[in-house]
Every structure is written in C-alpha cells, then in structure tokens.
Image: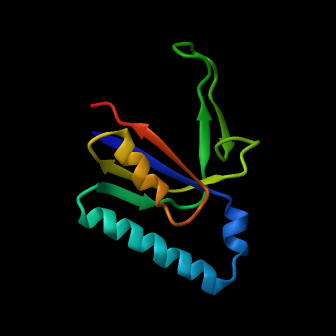
Amino acid sequence: MRYLLTFYAREDEWLSLPDDERQAGITEIGRWFAEHAQAGKIVEGHRLARGTKTVRLGRVRKRDRPMVSDGPFAETKETVGSYAVVEVRDEAEATAIAERWPAGGIVEIRPIAD
C-alpha cells in the first residue's frame, strides 16, 4: 500500500538555526531518505520550492469564482517543505517511518487510492 508523507515545519524556526545546525539537519534528512529508499520503502520524494499559491474553487460541484491567494492558509504557521511516497505493508509501517523523521515539525500520513 502507498502512503503520502507530507513534512511540515515552521520555516522561520528552520531559517533562524545557526548555519552549522541547519546543515546538520539537512544531512540527517538526507540519511533518512537514503535509508528508506535503499530499503525500497520510498518510491518518490522531493523537497519543495518556496512560493505556494492556493486556488480556492468554492463549493463542491458549484461554479463559484476562483480565488487565488499566497500560501496554503492565512492562519497556518507551518509550511510544507517536502514529501515522500512510501510503499509499505500497512498504515502502522508508514507511521513507524514517519516517527523517525529527523527534522521535527509535523508529518501528515495519507493513504493513496489505487
């Protein structure tokens, strides 16, 4: 079964780290991705660029006028920094992988419909 792991963090906290600590975090994240990719668990994953736009289309199946805004939500403090698609036996295994994410923040786990 495939799951989408989405990694959220406070960008201002990340950017306020001293350069050496931020670089150490990047190294740990690279090791995490490599470990799970070599084990055949991660089938795709990417760091995301800055500059999010959201297009709100309104109610489901209605023809509301689209609204475009910067960022995902006005109230959100966390931003999505990267994602990974993992192929695992079940949700418990996806959760175990997410719990080992070295960067802190939030990891959202969503099953992918086949």
Query: Residue 45, percent across and down?
Result: 37, 57
Q: Is residue 113 left or right of residue 53?
A: left
The quarter of the picture where the N terminus appears is top left
Query: Residue 46, percent across and down?
Result: 41, 60
Q: Is residue 88 above or below residue 55?
A: below
Q: Nearer the viewer, residue 24 or 50?
A: 24
Query: Residue 91, percent across and down?
Result: 37, 39
- Outermost residue on the top side: it is 62
The quarter of the picture where the C terminus appears is top left
Residue at the image position 29 percent from the left and 63 percent from the top: 37
Q: Nearer the viewer, residue 88 or 9?
A: 88
Q: Is residue 101 above or below residue 92?
A: below
Residue at the image position 73 percent from the left and 65 percent from the top: 12
Q: Is residue 31 left or right of residue 19?
A: left
Residue at the image position 72 percent from the left and 66 percent from the top: 13
Q: Is residue 70 above or below residue 21?
A: above
